[in-house]
Image (cartoon, rainbow, N blue to C red):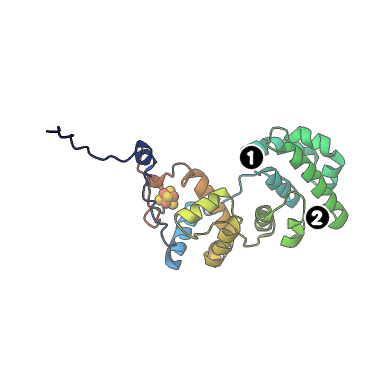
Amino acid sequence: MPSRQPTRTRKSPISARLAAPIVAAAPATPDPVGPDTVAEIFARLSAANPEPRAELEFQNPFTLLVAVVLSAQATDRSVNLATAPLFAIADTPAAMLALGEERVRDFIRTIGLFNTKAKNVVALSRILVEQHGGEVPRAREALEVLPGVGTKTASVVRNVAFGEETIAVDTHIFRVSNRIPLVVAPTTDKVQAGLEAIVPAPYRLNAHHWLILFGRYICKARKPECYRCPIADLCRFPAKTSAP
Ligand code: SF4
């Protein structure tokens, strides 16, 4: 009589088991808060800091423009350290042009991308001297064609130097807007358009400063400090942090 073979349990191949995906359910993106909540958020940010200021140091529209150009992928602190001696001898387009690319480069070599930035600063100074009488233009179109000047830089200059109600969107504002969310959008241009459409008029001039400072010091990139956030009860971010 033939011996019976033990019954074997069929197992899936190891490769198949290892390949089985382990997927954590991603929290759904909440809907943006409504107009009343937007107004309340800005009322609180305004109350906490009634006169917000840019952390970049500058003396006039031209030095503001140069400082913002230099601040791409650099901290405001590193830019301020480099521009203090630079602006002491060149705070106009004509003086910057006379200084020349090589000397500008020497002043800013502690800042990332200093070669390209030195070239851009001298080139934009030349355009300001030759085409704008040595003045920084106010129009977005005229600013955005200057070397090293994109949408964000133009918006900062128009807002800070000329009092235009633009909301330049940097990495902090982009993150904060999508987290709360004020605006859910995949690009900085779309977040800017969304914010400019929903921020109530009394807050539009300073919204850029409030949101940048809020993102820098409270709603930080890696670990937001929700436990000390003045708008925690209004924010819909699903992964709020607790006190350390
Ligand atoms: S509660 Fe947290 S995630 Fe929401 S805005 Fe405040 S710091 Fe940012």
Q: Position of residue 97 (x, y in %)?
A: 85, 44
Foreground pick, 55 / 243: 243
- Check the image and name the residue furthest to the left: 1
Instruction: Point out residue 90 in the picture as x, y percentages from the top left corner.
Output: 80, 41
* 10 Å crowding of disc 1: few (<14), some (14-19), many (20+): some
Classify the position of the C terminus by image quarter. top left
Which mark is first along the chain, 2 or 1?
A: 1
Residue 87 in view:
no
- Residue located 45% across and 67% down the image: 35
Element marked by disc 1? loop
Q: Is residue 240 left or right of residue 55?
A: left
Please identify the quarter of the rendering in which residue 231 is found: bottom left
**Who's the residue at 49% across and 52% down the image?**
176
Of residue 75 and residue 175, the one placed in the foreground of this image is: 175
Residue closest to the eye, 140 or 51: 140
Q: Could you say which disc has been placed on residue 225 in the image?
A: none
In the rendered image, the vertical position of residue 49 relative to residue 115, given as above or below: below
For label 2, the SS is loop
| Residue 17 percent coordinates (x, y) | 34, 40
Q: Is residue 53 visible?
A: yes
Alpha carbon of mark 1 to alpha carbon of mark 2: how far? 26 Å
Q: Is residue 55 above or below residue 37?
A: above
Nearer to us in this view, 204 or 147: 147
- Give the position of the N terminus as an image quadrant: top left
Splitting the image into 4 quarters, where does residue 72 fall? top right
- Residue 74's label in the rendered image is 1
**Pointer 2: what residue?**
135
Look at the numbered disc 2 and say if its residue's Cβ is closer than 8 Å to ligand 1.
no
Direction from residue 209 to residue 121 in the image, left or right = right
